[in-house]
Amino acid sequence: DRRFVPESLFPAPAPRSSAVPGPGRVWEAGVVPEQTTRHRLLVSVPDLGDANFDQTVVYVIEHDGDGALGVVLNRPSDTEVVEHLPELCAPVLSPAVFFVGGPVAVGGVLALGRRRLGSGSDPTGPVAPLPGSLALIDMEALLDGRVDGIDAVRLFTGYSGWAAGQLDAEIAAGAWHVVTALPDDVLCGDPGSLWRSVMRRQGGRTAAQGLFPEDPSVN
């Protein structure tokens, strides 16, 4: 069952990390690790063995000395946003469902959006610019109709969080490929094919891993 009922409308802080948004707050970047994954993609190896992240693509919103935070891009739920937020002030990107952003604070909601061409940015406002046309949006402001300059949004229930040094250790152990995020990856319209398409475009052995069956037991 991939339906859920939102328990709250903004994520609760993750343990041991300051890189987490609360109501009315956007990120204040801390000390950046020497090899940060910020604003890049984590692509899980096919035999990861963790149901939370098997064959997932994670967009890393923040990665500093306190830990890392991101959202899984290719786990749409079966719950339509309109069921719970019928009067949201911004259009919801297709597929217009809540996405399962990760195992932390499931039931809370985090919003990413696409900034309108030519829209300005206020570092103290509810829209925090990310690379390209992306933005992290304060959920409380979005619900109150206080967000301008956004064409469309995608809502994630929960997020993916790592304590200090945890993600670095997982990467060193070979659990993730760290790759460049292309403009259409984060808000893609076909999340079901995202993991394979990102793997294949890397070439070499990584591309070959993209041929891994969805259910290895039937291979």
Image (cartoon, helix red, strand yellow):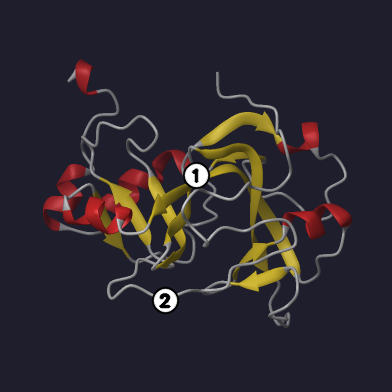
Lateral position of residue 104 relative to residue 137, left or right: left
The quadrant in which residue 138 appears is: bottom right
Label 2 sits on a secondary structure element that is: loop
Name the residue located 40 percent from the left edge and 42 percent from the top edge. Answer: 193
How far from the left and from the top, in percent, is residue 200?
Answer: 25, 52
In the picture of the structure, the residue carrying the numbered disc 2 is 31
N-term-proximal mark, 1 vs 2: 2
Q: Which mark is residue 190?
A: 1
Q: Residue 44 in the image: x percent, y percent?
A: 29, 45
Q: Residue 169, relative to residue 121: is it above or below?
A: above
Q: Amino acid at mark 1?
A: Asp
Disc 1 on helix, strand or loop?
loop
Q: Using the numbered discs, state the Cα–Cα distance from disc 1 to disc 2 in whole angstroms.
A: 35 Å
Residue 177 image position (x, y, % from top left): 25, 55
- Residue sitting at x 67%, y 41%: 96
Local packing at callout 2 (Cα closer than 10 Å; few below 14, some 14-19, many 20+) is: few
Identity of the residue drawn at 79% across and 55% down = 140
Residue name at image x 33 percent, y 35 percent:
54
Q: Quarter of the image for the C terminus: give it.
A: top left
Q: In the orientation shown, which residue stands out farthest toward the front?
A: 16
Query: Is residue 183 positioned above or below 91 on the image?
Result: below
The quarter holding residue 40 reads bottom left
Q: Position of residue 31 (x, y in %)?
A: 42, 76
Residue placed most toward the observer, 184 or 70: 70
Residue 200 is labelled as: none
Amino acid type of the residue that numbered disc 2 sits on in the rendered structure:
Val
